[in-house]
């Protein structure tokens, strides 16, 4: 059975023989910009019967002038979290994410073609798989994933936006934008003490890296950190009439006790 996680103080990460057992604490928060529906959607899941598949975290930010963006974001995240645990056991996390993103893109581009009278819906998406002593990452768009290790906050993703300042929020890559999806993939080592941060542009573009790092370092509670990130982002947006939804997912890696 796939277990959806809203908040947890102890998600054990499967460890191979001889590895130091790790656990994960997760906190999540989201909020809509004033006067609009929230088009972000996040999800965290694991499968109790297959702990070796790890914990999957996903964050999507839907973009569209009509009301279809929220539904698309939710469908993308829910299908990825469900289908990840159905791929062949021998597949690596990166291979599974590649195939699933391809299928998701096919679905959304087909939906956009089926509704030509409406503006096309696209989705910025970041997916993180944590298992053993490693992480796997898939990303497209301008959601961001950071890793905080020691005193250093490192952005693990690249924004797929046009370089001109007046087009900094115009995506050049996203789920549903083109029939052929080009996503970024990365893998790395997982250590006790690492904190992973997944945020939509309503957080990172408003607060900046310095403020995000300060909030992460000032809280030992992932849920409290996520709530503060979203609250501060929405508060600062109000000062300049920002219109971006704000979502944060904070995952802290610890040695299992």
Image: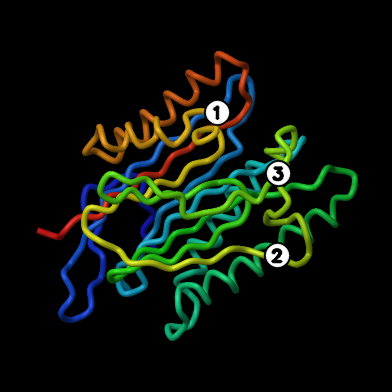
Task: Identify the residue shown where x is 46% and y is 55%.
Answer: 156
Task: Identify the residue shown where x is 52% and y is 68%.
Answer: 83
Say which residue label 2 marks: 181
Say which residue label 1 marks: 32
Say which residue label 3 marks: 163
> Is any atom of residue 1 visible in this view?
no
Q: Earlier in the sequence, mark 2 or mark 3?
A: 3
Residue that extends furthest to the right in the rendered view of this protein: 117
**Residue 160 as seen in the image, left or right of residue 211:** right
Q: Nearer the viewer, residue 19 or 73?
A: 19
Query: How many neighbours does mark 3 have within 10 angstroms: few (below 14), some (14-19), or many (20 or more)?
Result: few
Residue 10 coordinates in the image, percent (x, y)? 21, 53
Residue 134 coordinates in the image, percent (x, y)? 33, 68
Q: Which mark is residue 15?
A: none
- Secondary structure found at label 2: loop
Task: Identify the residue shown where x is 56% and y is 48%.
Answer: 60
The span from disc 2 to disc 1 (Cα, nearest Å) is 28 Å
Question: In the image, which is nearer the foreground, mark 2 or mark 1?
Answer: 2
Task: Identify the residue shown where x is 60% and y is 49%.
Answer: 159
Quarter of the image where one finds residue 92: bottom left
Where's the C terminus, which quadrant?
A: bottom left
Tell me whether the residue at label 2 lies in contact with that at label 1, contact meaning CB atoms closer than 8 angstroms.
no
Residue that extends furthest to the top in the rendered view of this protein: 239
Query: How many neighbours does mark 2 have within 10 angstroms: few (below 14), some (14-19), or many (20 or more)?
Result: some
């Amino acid at each position: 059975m796939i277990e959806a996680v809203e908040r947890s103080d102890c998600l054990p990460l499967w460890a191979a023989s001889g590895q130091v057992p790790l656990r994960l604490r997760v906190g999540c928060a989201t909020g809509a910009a004033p006067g609009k529906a929230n088009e972000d959607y996040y999800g965290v899941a694991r499968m109790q019967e297959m702990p070796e598949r790890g914990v999957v975290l996903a964050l999507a930010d839907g973009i569209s002038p009509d009301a279809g963006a929220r539904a698309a974001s939710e469908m993308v995240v829910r299908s990825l979290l469900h289908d990840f645990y159905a791929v062949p056991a021998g597949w690596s996390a990166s291979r599974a994410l590649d195939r699933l993103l391809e299928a998701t893109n096919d679905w959304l581009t087909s939906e956009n073609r089926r509704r030509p009278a409406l503006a096309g819906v696209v989705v910025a998406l970041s997916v993180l798989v944590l298992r053993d002593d490693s992480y796997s990452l898939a990303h497209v768009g301008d959601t961001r994933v950071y890793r905080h290790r020691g005193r250093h906050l490192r952005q693990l993703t690249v924004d797929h936006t046009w370089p001109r300042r007046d087009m900094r929020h115009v995506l050049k890559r996203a789920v549903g934008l083109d029939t052929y999806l080009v996503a970024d993939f990365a893998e790395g080592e997982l250590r006790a003490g690492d904190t992973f941060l997944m945020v939509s542009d309503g957080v990172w573009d408003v607060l900046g890296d310095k403020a995000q790092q300060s909030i992460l370092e000032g809280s030992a509670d992932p849920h409290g950190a996520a709530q503060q990130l979203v609250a501060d982002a929405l508060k600062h947006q109000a000062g300049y009439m920002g219109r971006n939804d704000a979502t944060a997912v904070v995952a802290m890696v610890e040695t299992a006790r």
